[in-house]
Image (cartoon, helix red, strand yellow):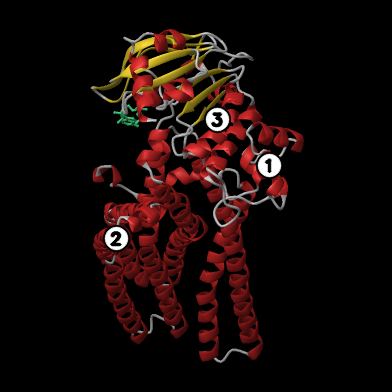
Amino acid sequence: MGEDTLAGSPLRHLSMLVRYLRGERTAMTLLALLVPSGIVLQLVAPYLLRGFIDGTLSGDSGGALTDLAAWSLAAALGVLVVTTGTEALSSRLAWRSTDRLRADLVAHCLSRPPDFYRAHPPGELVERMDGDVTRLAAVMSALLLELLAQALLIVGVLVALFRLEWRLALVFAPFAAGTLLLLRTLVGRAMPFVTARQRVAADLQGFLEERLAAAEDLRSNGAARYTLRELGERQDDLYRKAREAARVSARWPATVQGLSAVSVVLALAVSAWLHSRGQLSTGTAFASLSYAMLLRRPLLAVTTRFRDLEDAAASVQRLRDLLGHGTAPRTGNRTLPAGRPGVRFDRVSFSYEPDEPVLRDVSFTLRPGERLGVVGRTGSGKSTVVRLLFGLHRPVTGTVSAGGLDVTELDPRALRGRVALVTQEVHVFHAALRDNLTFFDRTVSDDRLHAALGEAGLGPWLRTLPDGLDTLLGAGARGMSAGEEQQLALARVFLRDPGLVLMDEPTARLDPYSERLLVPALERLLDGRTAVVVEHRPHLLRNADRILVLEDGEVAEEGERTALAADPSSHFHELLRTAGAAR
Ligand SMILES: Nc1ncnc2c1ncn2[C@@H]1O[C@H](COP(=O)(O)OP(=O)(O)OP(=O)(O)O)[C@@H](O)[C@H]1O
């Protein structure tokens, strides 16, 4: 992100928030009434003060003075009520609108392809959804409103001063105008620095998240000290960025303070001069000074709050980047027919990076119910075949189809409903077993859950659980072995009963004993379904109908498993021989 894109008014960046305020019409209307009322009440106080002082000096009766005192008290109480009401309403507004923004962000992230998560580690995303959104909540509840109120107050004070004593107003008007002009030129100047600070802070969060997740590896490799060294470097960088941002942001409060002091001295001098010539009553002089003080406050508040406003604007900029990043692959709205789909790769080429082809001209066909075993060296493109079929990427050229339909034209939700992907990565949520199976869908019956667990071979394990389907799993709760986790992944698939199953080395992280336990469940899952199974260990492909051998992204061999296994000149035969010797 270039710094030039950050120049300009923070208010321009904050305009994105307006969308989230639209649903809050009632609160906005009430605020629109309360804010000016509060300002009028503040402006009335010096007027009452003037009347009180001049009345006292001219020997007015006690009754009139008591009335003025009562009105002053009523105005002060009014300010209290209005301020409390404004704060309550604006914080409600902030919570509700930022909740909507956060929900949009989560929905956006959940719909992104895998590349998005490579570009944005979870720690960074959490900082955006929590840190940035919370900063925005502060802006929405206090800052924007305060800025608006203070701007109105400045105008109100100048109008009141003009009515009271135009010569004094002439001193203050250029001061207020000059300060506002100065602010306008300073607006946005600190934003690149604030953004840089926030970016380094989010990176630090991502770094911590990654290193803590790898704590076991770091410890066993004696690498904890390198992590601490890098942490130190990142913290130093964050300190430098924070210092630069603070240095730039600190300029204008100091400028306004200086200007304000000069203007108050000027106002005092003009008041004293007019008073000595008998052209200004003592009450008016006091009232003018009160207005001078009242004017100084919003200008200072505006300037000191400006830093928070820039923080928030930088947050919006980062959130906009996030919302615009990682365009989901273009998809269609067609649905896969029920049953077992056939699969076809027709001259498919694909690359993750330009000019670095990963698959070249790959073609094969799988009839409904057939199982394909995909083998090949590391990096030959096996997983990529599965990802293309699961609609995670679009081929650069050629067509990938399932059930006779181009996968890129399918509605992704419908595709995921009919096609299941099982990999070696299984995420166990810190949640009840039933939620882990249904992904929090509470409409699935217990009978179906028991049946799926039974199919996956987890029936005996289920009977050992203290709370059955309600047993809490995940971090800090009931632990699972790697094999049981993999069986849980299979139970999830049994529950969905897909027509096409894609497997990417589901047993890769299992020891031979756990693998033997898992294989029957795997075979039950593949039974009666079309399947594509990526597997390094050819003995696990004994039930495959066809074999695809990939070499450096190209089809080295494709055909019926039994024919290839029997042909001593085939790659597959060679693979079986080498694997047999190794076992
Ligand atoms: N997201 C990605 N971005 C860039 N390159 C990638 C990405 N994913 C995979 N690759 C590269 O594409 C090539 C094929 O990867 P793929 O994962 O399909 O191979 P594979 O045959 O499944 O390997 P393995 O057996 O090790 O799992 C590799 O060179 C890999 O480095």
Q: Which residue is mark 2?
A: 231
- Label 1 vs label 2: CA separation? 46 Å
- Of the two numbered discs 3 and 1 on the same chain, state the one appearing first in sequence: 1
> Disc 2 marks which amino acid?
Leu
Query: Could you tell me the amino acid type at mark 1?
Result: Pro
Quadrant of the rendered image holding ligand 1: top left
Residue 284 appears in which quarter of the rendering? bottom left
> Which of these two is toward me, 288 or 374?
374
Q: Determine whether the residue tagged by mark 1 lies in a helix, strand or loop.
A: helix
Closer-to-camera residue (507/488) = 507
Give the residue at x 60% y 14%.
340
Task: Determine which of the numbered discs, if any, sits on residue 229 in the image.
Answer: none
What residue is shown with label 3? 519
Q: Indicate the amino acid at tag 3.
A: Val
Q: Is mark 2 within 8 Å of ligand 1?
A: no
Residue 226 place in picture, x, y as percent: 26, 59
Relative to 216, does residue 551 appear above or below in the rendering? above
Q: CA distance from mark 3 to mark 1?
A: 16 Å
